[in-house]
Image (cartoon, rainbow, N blue to C red):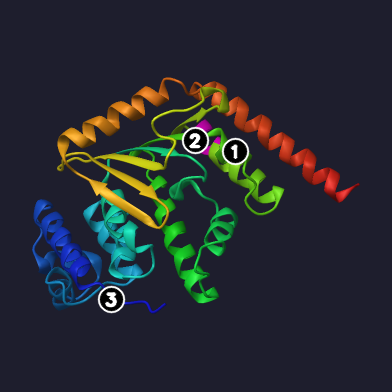
Amino acid sequence: MAIEDNPQSRVKYGEELRRLREAAGLTQEELSQRAVMSRTHIAHIEAGRRRPDVDDARRLDQVLGTGGFFVRFLPTLDGRKVAEHFKEALEFEGKATVIKEYAPTLVPGILQTKAYAYEVLSSAYPRPSDEERDKLLATRLERARILDNFHSPEVCAMLDEAVLRRVIGETEVMCEQLRHIVELSESRRIRVHVLPFSAGAHPLQEGFLSLMWFAELPPIAYAEGVNSGRILELPSVVRDCQEIYDHVLGDALSHRKSLDLLRAVTEDYEHEAQRAQHP
């Protein structure tokens, strides 16, 4: 699978740079001096003719105070670093101020540890080459940096109990992954709710759902299934998705009880790993 440049996303990247630069009251020349980049290079980026590298993006984020937006936006410039159906959702994710997700079988991408993500991506079909998998892994880990900013976006993750019970990789991988979610929750960076098996059938059981809110855009929903995903923007449809999410959330465990369950399942995995090492 070749890594192809994405001209449309380059143009969007440039438009966002120009908008945020002007909002900051800076000319291209002033931005170039502060970001230690040439004015011509900035002009080419804004026009969609050139793509910045990671160092450029980090300097732009620092000067414009955009909380890592330009770094997170970078993967959209490469057409094949994420699944085709996720490209547009990735752009929205980088702009969201609030994200609420329901995950039926796997830990949501922005919460995945490196080892967990490695196992998930290695199981894809058709099987990716090592190079393709590593590029996808790098993108997924870069997405997780959205949590580096303590204040935005606000994140609420509703996890089906199957997410906790399905062993991805070895038990050590699961221990690390569940501890990571607990740590993010204990540090008040995210809220997590587990939907127990006892909840039975519910309206979200058929697939992954992500709800996103923005400072300057109307909210959207992103629904994903097998090798497919779509952005939902029609206000009435988005409201329906929000109401369904809230309805199902009512059957989920509280944040505190969810953390208790996560810790208990982690301990079970730890004991299982110890028994495997010392039969």
**Residue 15 in the figure: left or right of residue 225:** left
Give the prevailing secondary structure in the magenta stretch. helix
Identified by mark 1, the residue type is: Leu
Q: Earlier in the sequence, mark 2 or mark 1?
A: 2
In the current view of this chain or complex, which residue is farthest to the right? 279
Q: Where does the magenta region start and end?
A: 182-186
As drawn, 35 above or below 237 = below
Identify the residue at image location x=33%, y=45%.
223
- Distance of label 2 from label 1 (alpha carbons): 8 Å
Under circle 3, the secondary element is loop
Q: Which residue is mark 2?
A: 159
Marks 1/3 in contact by CB < 8 Å: the verdict is no
Identified by mark 2, the residue type is: Leu
Residue 63 image position (x, y, % from top left) = 24, 57
Under circle 1, the secondary element is helix
Q: Earlier in the sequence, mark 1 or mark 3?
A: 3
**Residue 169 in the figure: left or right of residue 225:** right
Q: Toward which corner of the image does residue 197 lie, by quadrant?
A: top right
Q: Earlier in the sequence, mark 3 or mark 2?
A: 3
Identified by mark 3, the residue type is: Asp
Q: Nearer the viewer, residue 109 or 236?
A: 236
Instruction: Say the numbered circle drawn on residue 5.
Output: 3
